[in-house]
Image (spheres, grey):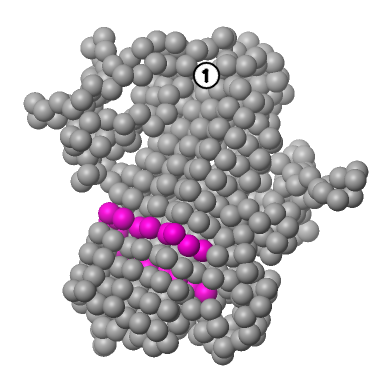
Amino acid sequence: MSELDLKLLSVGQRSAVVELCDPLADYNAEEYELILSGGRTIKTDRAVVEIFDLSPSCEYKITASRSGKTGKELSFKTESEFVTLNVRDFGARGDGVTDDTQCIQAAILCCPPKSRVLIPRGIFKFTNLFLKSDITLELAEGAVLSAIPDKSRLPILPGRIESTDERSEFLPASWEGDPLNSFASLITGMYVENVRICGRGTLDGSASFGNWWNAEARKNDPARPKMIFLNHCKNVTVSGITLKNSPAWNIHPYFSENLRFFCLNIQSPANSHNTDGLNPESCTGVEIAGIHFSVGDDCIAIKSGKLYMGRTYKTPSKDIYIHNCLMLRGHGGVTVGSEIAAGVDGITVRSCRFVETDRGLRVKTRRGRGRDSYLRGILFDSVKMEGVLTPFVINCFYYCGPDGKSEYVATKEKLPVDGRTPRVSDITMRNVVCENCSVAGIYFYGLPESPIERVEMENVRIAFSKDAKPSRAAMMNGCEPTCRKGIFIRNVGQVTFKNVTVEGYDGEKEDISGVGCVVRED
């Protein structure tokens, strides 16, 4: 396969997403040109690109070209479209003052299958919207869906509703791994299928420290809304748009499957609260590519609920592929946990770049997540990190949450293995370069009664900054601030090092104990 070959990731009615097959690319690539049939050209330096302004039910051919070299021609056909419903035709003003919620919702409810709801250029004030199946919601270039941050006007979604047979339940809402009452998210998909949200416009949550980020003002309220909440959905694609100033998590897929997130720009201030970028929870078959994250919490956090949800539904997050993304700031680049009671199985992170995140790979769990919390099959491959405080963290004593600082969670003494004990296994990091780190290179701390089973690191280079400042490598009791700490490992069954180098550390390069076997193939 040539470095200029293209792969089709997604195709809709009026846009398509392609990936450049350049093995040296991460979020960016050396500038190249896309040439579409008909002579249209697009210059870009993005490895994953969404192409707009296509026509429905049309065949296209596209090639990539750079410095006189051309890749193989890629052919595709756009999907059919029955009709476009412009929200202005339903009374929406888009003047930045009028509340256009009902007009936009009317267009969505009236939209027939395989059709498009168009938000044209303008500022459309709204409270919240609910999706329906078999439609496309497009935010045109210059369109802004601007949330009205008035909680008195938002519906409340109950966390749990008991079924009439008293043997099952309906779960309309979730907050940090539990079924808790929440304000309706700005865009909610509830049991919908075959939906596309796309475009070059902006979804603005209008959150600030004067409203949603003010903890004092939220006392006794339901949980904050997210930007996009997908509850038990299938075949959903979100691409192209900008999301900014979310009240809480930006995108929260929940018990959903076959999801695609491409070419998004997700922005929240670095000091904003709980503004995670994209948090799949108990989801299967998720692809995340070409996204620029700059948020106030974890960029991506993969979850599967707290103990009640894990024991009751036993639905792990699995088969998740993250590639060609840029994580700029945030607590963790890619995080697994901490609400992870049903486990994860099969997470691949490839060809991504992390810049100034607190941690790169961040695994966080603790006692109490339960026996179904088996975290396994996590692969980091061909990743670049710049200015990341601690590139690799596996923390089995994570202390946030109501019980996080209890003696049961915090003690380093070996406790009996029971139904509350989690497991971590089969984590691989290879072909990773980490420049200008500060706090620690590797910080792994497993449970003494349930050690991290297997970790393999191959072709990994860690280099510390000369201007490094101390901080805590992991959020756990007993983790004191450090600076340029090389490799710290506790309670692991087997660690394999193949060509792993650490440069510029202070003191001893390695502080390893409680490890059953260390295999070195340098």
Residue that appears at 56% across and 90% down: 413
The x, y position of residue 23, in whole percent, is 22, 44
Query: Is most of the magenta stretch helix, strand or loop?
Result: strand
- Please name whichever residue, 423 or 43, is drawn nearer the observer in this view of the structure: 423
> Relative to 34, is 307 above or below?
below
Quarter residue 498 falls in: bottom left
- Please name whichever residue, 245 or 48, is drawn nearer the observer in this view of the structure: 48
Residue that appears at 39% across and 81% down: 489
* 11 on left or right of 108: left
- Please name whichever residue, 368 or 141, is drawn nearer the observer in this view of the structure: 368
Q: Amino acid at mark 1?
A: Pro
The x, y position of residue 381, in whole percent, is 31, 55
Q: Is residue 424 visible?
A: yes
- Please name whichever residue, 202 or 514, is drawn nearer the observer in this view of the structure: 514
Residue that appears at 61% across and 86% down: 415
Quarter residue 312 falls in: bottom right
Residue that appears at 19% across and 32% down: 4
Q: What residue is disc 1 on?
A: 120
**How many badges with numbers are in the image?**
1
The x, y position of residue 476, in whole percent, is 52, 77
* 426 on left or right of 2: right
Is residue 391 within the magenta segment?
A: yes
* 423 on left or right of 497: right
Boundaries of the magenta span: 375-396
What is the secondary structure assignment of the residue under circle 1? loop
Is residue 321 within the magenta segment?
A: no
> Relative to 303, is 233 above or below?
above
